[in-house]
Amino acid sequence: MTTTAAPSIRLARRFHVGWTIVLFSSIVIGALAAIPIYAYLYDYTALHWWLFGSLYLISGLGITVGYHRLMSHRSFDCPDWVKAGLLIAGAWALQNSAIKWTADHLRHHAHCDEEADPYNAKLGFWHSHCGWLFSERKHDDIQYASRVAQDPVALWQHRHYTAIVLAGLALTFAIGFVENGLVGGLGCFLLAGVGRTFAVLNSTFCINSVCHIWGNQPFSSKDSSRDSWWVSLITFGEGYHNYHHTFPSDYRNGAHWYDFDPSKWLIYTLYLLGLASGLRTASYAAADRSPRA
């Protein structure tokens, strides 16, 4: 890991819990109180809902394809400009930089169901869903992301993470403002900005909670990971979590052609367009074999 990244990562640790409480309290209050109040007073337009859906898809795939399958597990490679687009989209999901996200996620794989597991499901649904964000982080170890912390695109995203997040939120206000002035800007910001962030956070949190408590274990029972088809519907294929824990480097979480896994479809589409390479699968270990979706 380069020394340029280390100071900012250590600083973020010191103030982690306080800022997390403020940030997530604001999102929850905005989603559960401000959004319905605005709906009662003004109502949301088709543009607001369209942008909500579009940004849910974009930011969700930024996490599943960019943060998870690309950066954390190296299940495929892509040009830097494609990687940058995925990491910008992932930042809009408000789940920290790719470096920090990878450190937590790879520690989860290394210590699943143990004390060092940040999302340890043995501590209950609340902890594994989001309570871990407010817990003491004594097992934090950025070395799990040492490889990602040397990636120039990941370092760029880490340094400019706050600006990228704010730009995404500002975009929702600007689009709504063009449509209907301040009222339209506020409505679009609340629904497509705050509400969409709340939805993406909770859907992806379900992978850590629901997929370690309820579901099937068709591939391995070595840890608590489980497959949940309905979680896959809201997380673009990440619900096939037992398969993922068994074969973490596979670019597919849903290995069968009929599994609902839009993330693998996007990766495979990039491959067909020449924008992704080195797709890794559990069944195609040889480098000279072509992957399949």
Image (tube, rainbow, N blue to C red):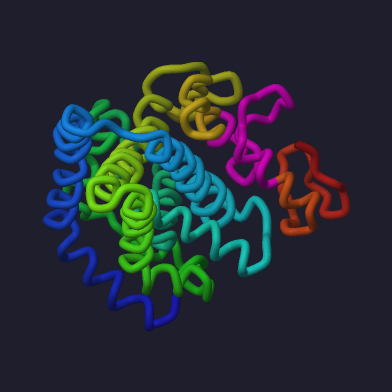
Quadrant in which the N terminus is drawn: bottom left
Q: Quadrant of residue 194?
A: top left
Quadrant in which the C terminus is drawn: top right
Give the residue displayed 32% in from the left and 59% down from the top: 170
- The percent position of residue 222, horizontal first and vertical second, equals 49, 29
Residue 174 in the magenta stretch? The answer is: no
- The percent position of residue 226, horizontal first and vertical second, equals 48, 24
- The percent position of residue 173, horizontal first and vertical second, equals 31, 54
Q: Is residue 233 above or below residue 289?
A: above
Q: Count of labels shown? A: 0
Q: Is residue 219 visible?
A: yes
Give the residue displayed 33% in from the left and 68% down from the top: 163
Q: Nearer the viewer, residue 285 or 191?
A: 191
Q: Nearer the viewer, residue 22 or 163?
A: 163
Q: Is residue 30 above or below residue 72?
A: above
Q: Is residue 66 above or below residue 150?
A: above
Give the residue displayed 61% in from the left and 68% down from the top: 81
Q: Nearer the viewer, residue 50 or 139?
A: 50
Q: Is residue 96 visible?
A: no
Q: Quadrant of residue 202?
A: top left
Q: Which residue, as the protein is rendered here, is positioned at the far bottom? A: 3
- Residue 78 left/right relative to 149: right
Residue 262 in the magenta stretch? The answer is: yes
Give the residue displayed 49% in from the left and 53% down from the top: 67
Magenta region, residue range: 242-267
Q: Nearer the viewer, residue 13 or 178?
A: 178
Q: Quadrant of residue 198?
A: top left
